[in-house]
């Protein structure tokens, strides 16, 4: 099945700004996150939205996608060659004319192990304050039985008699430019330069076994969704005594029911009755740091934003702490008693209908003037 257009996935036009892309993704992530939405297709939609966001939020990837579509986003457009195989026999041509001299690699030389990636899902508060935790990852380690040789204990490996330990076979060819040497990986030893007469029964001659390893991870306070932590030396084991690779822990943060995060700032919406807004009040407001008291001035309007300094997210690099922004929403009651209706009518009769703004001017008066053209 063909992929949907990334802009269509996020419900945006091609001229969408970075901020619009980010907000659209956060909205979809909250809706379809597998830990929140248990519908059968929720996980697929979440991954689709994440893939679209990762492409469109990156300027280079977005430019490639806009020009070449999905192929460009995956590095297969004209800007990304996708490997030497795109050129067919380019490697063969290089070897034929130059003998592969600049590409020869000792099969027994130490090589660094592969890097690993692990995705960790955090609660909102865990990302804010950080944590110490352990993860278990599958990784290849040196076989304890043969100590990485691949040979049965008590036996030894032998040098490949076909390539004499080089891991490569040389063939000569006559060309219009003269006789040249063409090098190929030795198919007798698969390029290792060694033959194992008696293979280790534990690792079947590979010298490596798959294990599940526990690794301690420190999640720094303030880490954000999509960021990653590099754990040096915790990737796959090296080859021929080479150093191990690294482990990259990619963080995903679950959406919160009440708070929303933008960088180091936290946003939330707090409802007020129109009585509280009109007369003023002091209310208790939740923050990730605990509950605080907030004074609501008389005449507060819906949409008013209050800022609680230092009640946001600690900066992951240690540059202070963000703020919490509280958006006020005035809630209009829908079920009134007869007595309440009577009091409201009385309030309206004595001038309650003449609404004033925060500067004390009559909003309705200015509204009427606009229609009269005054």
Image (spheres, helix red, strand yellow):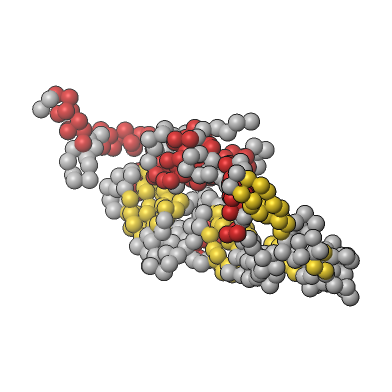
The structure residue drawn at horizontal position 53% and vertical position 60%, both measured from the top left corner, is 228
Residue 197, by quadrant, is: bottom right
> Is residue 92 depicted above or below 107 in this figure?
above
Name which quarter of the figure residue 166 lies in.
Answer: bottom right
Residue in the image at 14% along x and 24% along y:
372
Q: Quadrant of residue 186?
A: bottom right
Looking at the image, residue 147 sits to the left or right of residue 302; the answer is right
Return the residue nearer the eye: 321 or 57: 57
> In the rendered view, would you say 118 is above or below 93?
below
Q: Is residue 233 above or below residue 344?
A: below
State the quadrant of the N terminus.
top right
Report the number of numbered marks: 0
Residue lying farthest top?
372
Along the viewing direction, whichever of 135 and 28 lies nearer the viewer: 135
- The quadrant of the rendering that contains the C terminus is top left
Q: Position of residue 171 (x, y in %)?
A: 71, 53
Q: Is residue 368 visible?
A: yes
Residue 193, horizontal then vertical, whole percent = 75, 64
Q: Is residue 235 visible?
A: no
Q: Residue at x 47, y 43 (%)?
A: 79
């Amino acid at each position: 099945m063909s992929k949907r257009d990334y802009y269509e996935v996020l419900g945006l036009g091609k001229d969408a700004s970075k901020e619009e892309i980010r907000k659209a993704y956060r909205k979809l992530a909250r809706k379809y996150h597998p830990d929140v939405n248990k519908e059968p297709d929720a996980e697929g939609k979440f991954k689709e939205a994440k893939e679209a966001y990762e492409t469109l939020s990156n300027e280079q990837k977005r430019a490639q996608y806009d020009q070449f579509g999905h192929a460009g986003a995956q590095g297969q457009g004209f800007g990304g060659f996708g490997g030497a195989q795109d050129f067919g026999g380019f490697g063969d041509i290089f070897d034929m004319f130059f003998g592969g001299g600049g590409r020869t690699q000792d099969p027994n030389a130490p090589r660094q192990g592969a890097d690993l990636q692990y995705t960790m899902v955090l609660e909102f508060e865990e990302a804010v304050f950080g944590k110490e935790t352990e993860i278990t990852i599958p990784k290849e380690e040196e076989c304890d039985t043969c100590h990485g040789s691949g040979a049965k204990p008590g036996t030894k490996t032998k040098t490949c008699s076909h390539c004499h330990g080089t891991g490569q076979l040389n063939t000569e060819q006559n060309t219009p430019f003269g006789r040249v040497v063409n090098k190929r990986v030795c198919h007798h030893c698969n390029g290792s330069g060694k033959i194992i007469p008696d293979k280790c029964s534990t690792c079947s001659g590979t010298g490596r076994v798959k294990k599940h390893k526990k690794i301690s991870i420190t999640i720094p306070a303030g880490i954000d969704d999509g960021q990653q932590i590099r754990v040096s030396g915790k990737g796959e084991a090296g080859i021929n005594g080479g150093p191990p690779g690294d482990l990259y822990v990619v963080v995903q943060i679950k959406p919160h029911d009440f708070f929303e995060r933008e960088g180091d700032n936290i946003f939330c919406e707090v409802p007020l009755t129109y009585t509280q807004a009109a007369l003023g009040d002091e209310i208790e407001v939740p923050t990730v740091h605990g509950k605080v008291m907030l004074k609501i001035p008389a005449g507060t309007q819906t949409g008013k934003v209050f800022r609680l300094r230092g009640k946001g997210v600690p900066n992951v690099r240690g540059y202070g702490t963000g703020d919490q922004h509280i958006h006020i929403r005035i809630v209009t009651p829908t079920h009134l008693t007869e007595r309440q209706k009577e009091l409201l009518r009385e309030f309206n009769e004595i001038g309650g209908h003449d609404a004033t703004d925060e500067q004390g001017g009559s909003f309705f008066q200015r509204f009427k003037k606009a229609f009269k053209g005054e």
